[in-house]
Image (tube, helix red, strand yellow):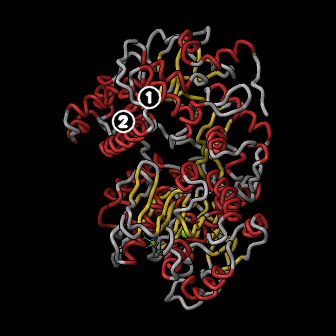
Amino acid sequence: LEPESEDESGYEYDSDQAIEFDETETIPEQDVEDDSKLPVMLHRKQLMDLVKHNQIVIVAGETGSGKTTKIPQFLYEDGYAEHGKIACTQPRRIAAMSVATRVAQEMNVRLGGKVGYTIRFDDNTSKETRIQYMTDGMLMREFLTDSEMSKFSAVMIDEAHERTLQTDVLLALIRDICTVRPELKVIISSATINSDRFSSYFGHAPVYVVPGRRFPVDILYVKQPEANYLQAAIMTVFQIHLTQDLGDILVFLPGQEDIENMAESLQETKLRLGNSIKDLLICPIYANLPSEQQARIFEPTPNGARKVVLATNIAETSLTIDGIVYVVDPGLVKEKEYNPRTMMESLVTKECSQASANQRAGRAGRVCPGKCFRLYTRQAYEDLLQPESRPEVLRVNLAAIVLLLMSFGVSNVFEFQLLDMPTPEALVKAMQTLYQLGAVNGAGKLTKLGRQMAEFPADPMLAKVLIASGTLGCSDEIITIIAMVGELGNLFYRPRGKKEEADFAHNSLSQPEGDHFTLLQVWFQWSASNFSYQWCRDHFVQHRTMKRVRDVRKQLFRLCERAGIISDAQANDPNAIQKALLAGYFAYTARLSKSGDFYITQGTKQSVWIHPSSSLHSRKPLPKYVLFHELALTSREFMRGVLVVEPEWIRQVAPHYFKQVEERKRPVLR
Ligand code: ADP
Ligand code: MG
């Protein structure tokens, strides 16, 4: 498999190199009931009777049956919002936004009024709000201020089958709350996978199965493995467009970069083929896309044209797009994974599970019989794809969750009963990280600093950086850097044919201290230009990313103010910014190797390289010590977001970590 390209792709459709597919099997048709109505509408009465007589109900149903959009409305209509709000959680921001928008339309109310949504850095609710869509992470945070969730009278944990870390923790917390709040109504809803496990976890709560409707879907596999999934996906889209009956296409890609690349290549090929082909509407969708453009995927396709939607696995179960007849599936997914070798978390592109592949295929059979083109062989499906995805709690860094649980008053995280328990080692590791950060003391108890960190809806490392910036007198700069550093991959662009011009512009922004300072420079210049679009164009910087940065920055400011972090202190220390970053990222540091061309990470002693897009990439000689924001594994383990630092500073800003490295001593754990 080719990793995501770091550069413009230049993929094209070449009709002489058609991809050959083997048709092997058909997913059979499923109960096609009265298809003028959504399935949940036909089951409203039985479902709501069950809710009336039971505190907890598990709803399992085919994607697109109306669970997410309709069930909260049923609850509302049946009066469950009279003494509290109805919450409906989503694992993804974009789903929370999109569904809330849709439901507000259906109920004919203003978004942010009776129906609203809350996602990190964006609260679109008001006093009026009765139905609140939100990310699972945001509902979990409610426990910090209100451990019985008294604002809510009904809670629907949606997409529970995705088993995100936040969902799992929410389920555990809600299970406890149910015992003290017998009037609280809880609905756990999931795609058809695994509903029995939820039921037994919740004391054998009743499971209501909403029969879905689905037409048969033919599954086609490539005959030969494809080396490059993006190229193969582009070829397949045009093969479908040129040879198959009308009907929209849905392509599943691992991430935003791929989606943007593919959208661009499709656009170019379309222009090249001109009027010789039927019209093809290219609709990318990802969280950072402006909402007007997100809405385009739901608009009906004009007669005679075909729509091709490029999405991540958001379209697997969270969003349903009507009119899809063809699915193109490279069989990949991008997942957060904790790498025990590097002891860090990174996003990796890997094979999706068989369950995911089947969900994806199912998307093709909503309106009529469909086809799913799998860009991997049947053999690969059987040998390489796991039957099911592993729950997130078993593969990510648990520091943030452990910190939250401790601040919720969970005294022994080792005894906190989750649907799947992480290994004791993973919990110990999380406690160690918290100890190093100073959030937990040697006795395993939450410190004042730890409590402060937990209040931030951010990773503990970032929270620590923000808190340190207050003391060091550089909050302003640090807030800007934090708002920007997560966007490193979406900030600079190099259009085909203008690469040199773009490189020149980017170099003019580049700062000798490294990427974090370059980001600051970008911000300074853009704000000095009065946030102009032209400045972004001239410097080959994505304007839409900068607009998002501006919003996030504003939100972070508000959060820091509320937490009393921003002080009037002046940064007397010329290295205040680096030190504040080190206060959280001390473990993400690396020392130059003897040979002088790569680095060795602190702690895990791993070889890593500076990412080619970094301001420091071609510095000669390379700096001795650096801090990095993340590791990205492509052809090599690359450090992304790299900053020059001095090792002595670590002793100053992270004494616990330093002590631990020195003494190789573990904190006492209870
Ligand atoms: P489920 O949660 O069971 O998967 P949903 O409630 O999400 O089902 O979807 C029900 C129907 O509502 C689908 O036919 C879907 O196409 C439609 N729908 C959902 N969101 C939107 C939207 N933002 N715009 C247009 N239609 C939508
Ligand atoms: Mg749904």
Eyeballing the image, is 67 above or below 569?
A: below
Between 57 and 471, which is closer to the camera in this rendering?
471
**Quadrant of the picture in which ligand 2 is shown:** bottom right
Q: Which of marks 2 and 1 is nearer the N terminus?
A: 2
Q: Which amino acid does label 2 sit on?
A: Phe
Is residue 553 visible to us here? yes
- Residue at image point 59% right, 90% down: 33
Q: How crowded is mark 1: few (under 14 residues within 10 Å), some or many (20 or more)?
A: some
Q: Is mark 1 on a helix, strand or loop?
A: loop
Q: Where is residue 104 in the image (x, y as percent from the top left)?
A: 39, 72
Give above or below for 519 relative to 358.
Answer: above
Horizontal relation, residue 43 to residue 495: left or right = right
Residue placed under numbered mark 1 in the picture:
613
Which residue is painted at 52% across and 21% down in the image? 582
Q: What residue would you read off at disc 2?
A: 492
Q: Which amino acid does label 1 sit on?
A: Ser
Q: In which quarter of the image is residue 539?
A: top left
Q: Position of residue 492 (x, y in %)?
A: 36, 36
At a point 51% along the width and 43% down the height, the residue shown is 457
Q: How far apart are marks 2 and 1 (CA)?
A: 9 Å
* Disc 2, SS: loop
Residue at point 39% right, 21% down? Answer: 473
Q: To which quarter of the image does residue 180 belong? A: bottom right
Q: Along the horizontal axis of the image, is 498 left or right of 640? A: left
Q: Up-down: is 197 above or below 38? A: above
Image quadrant occupied by the N terminus = top right
In the rendered structure, are the residues bearing label 2 and label 1 in contact, judged by CB atoms less than 8 Å apart? Answer: yes
| Quadrant where the C terminus is found in the figure | top right
Q: How many marks?
A: 2
Numbered mark located on residue 635 in the image: none
